[in-house]
Amino acid sequence: MTKTSSRPLRSRTRQVRAGLNRTGFSETSEALFMTSGYVYGSAEEAEASFDGTLDRMVYSRFKNPTVATFEERLAAVEGAAACRATASGMAAVHAALLCQLKAGDRVVAPRALFGSCTWIINDLLPRFGVRPTFVDGTDLDQWRAALAEPAAAVFLETPSNPTLDIVDLPAVADLTHRAGGRLVVDNVFATPCLQSPLELGADVVVYSATKHIDGQGRCLGGAVLGSAEFIADVLSPYLRHTGPALSPFNAWLLLKGLETLDLRVERHSANALKIARFLESRPEISRVLYPGLDSHPQHDLACRQMKGGFGGIVAFTLAGGKTAAYGLLNGLEVIDISNNLGDAKSLACHPWTTTHQRLAPEDKLAQGIGEGLIRLSVGLEDACDLVDDLRLALESGANGSKMDG
């Protein structure tokens, strides 16, 4: 049997227990249902299952018990009415936008976005007659101008990937709604532990659950959260017929990740602040971007709309450009070079040549991505070891590139 509480539960408890639906075996851990389909006791039961008379599982592309548990738990943690999981974070972004757009619509977004998000808005959507408008996400006057005419949707990241721009969510939400659109927020850098976009006026929240929600580099996953009406009537038919279903095994791993999410995010944030302060003291580094630093251009805004920390991502620019950036990366012994983030292990990458490589140079520069920029996902190691690793790499004077042969 599954215990249910008669009183509201706090977030830390919801991360462990929300959505728990034990089978007749009364297992402690969530059950893993590795099945593609389900059987019916009669032809009449099958008919009732498909015409909606009977609410039950019919196919794991539509719904699966393990996936449903993950969806219910993440919705409880986020404070959303409903959630649907997807096979990856980009599947979540794609579905959250495509499910609600049609030819003739307009989408407004900041220039500072993950490379694949930029491709969806700037390259894919126009093929279907959807017009994109890009703005500087930190400039409310540009938002006002762009949303002075109707827009079907606004999509943004805050903090943004990789330059950690902070967008004023309540202000942009108000402008979006006046323009007749929905505000879709990618909350992956902040996680539900540090920022609640729905409380700040957003209509839809998306995650790459691959990142902090799993948090250990094990699997891919994504999620879209919003109102019950949006999830049931707008998003779910799109997912049902296009099929970006989350694997039940991945859902089970993500459930395990949710159990420790706030504990890990707290350590990520504490370590990142120490790293950012260290990097700011180094003469080799011309700029450090971290919302928790007083020097961040939107530090005050971050303090208003983020809670309990500023996340585990730090971006910094080496004065020596690409050569210095490669020298630092190649000199690291603890921190790994990887384009992933949100992992227990610290990971660093060079966005100019990896995550944003396919953007034109002028578009990278417009986003604040220079050849000397490093994105560092700070992990759960001892912060002193990470500081030592960075210090020694900076002092080693390594330069140029190297490849294991």
Image (cartoon, helix red, strand yellow):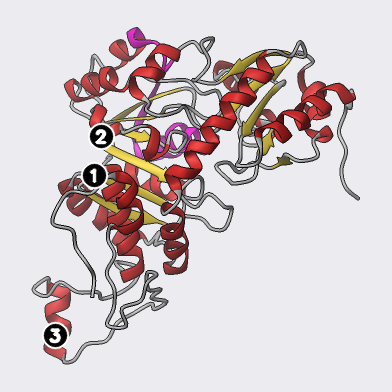
Q: Is residue 258 left or right of residue 78?
A: right
Q: Earlier in the sequence, mark 2 or mark 1?
A: 1
Question: Hey, what amino acid is under mark 2?
Answer: Leu
Residue furthest to the top in view is: 141
- Mark sitting earlier along the chain (3/2): 3
Circle 3 crowding by C-alpha within 10 Å: few under 14, some 14–19, many from 20? few
> Which mark's residue is nearer the viewer, 3 or 2?
2
Q: Position of residue 146 (x, y in %)?
A: 31, 15
In the image, what residue occupies the spot 30% across and 43% down? 78
x and y, in percent, of residue 15 in the image: 35, 51
| Inter-mark Cα distance, 1 to 3 | 32 Å
Q: Residue at x 41, y 52 (%)?
A: 258
Q: Within the magenta stretch, is there residue 168?
A: no
What is the magenta range? 114-141
In this rendering, which labeled residue sits more in front, label 1 or label 3? 1
Give, as a three-letter code, the residue at label 1: Ala
Which numbered tag is attached to residue 80? 1
Q: Which residue is mark 2?
A: 198
Residue furthest bottom in the image:
42
Residue 104 in sight from this viewpoint: no
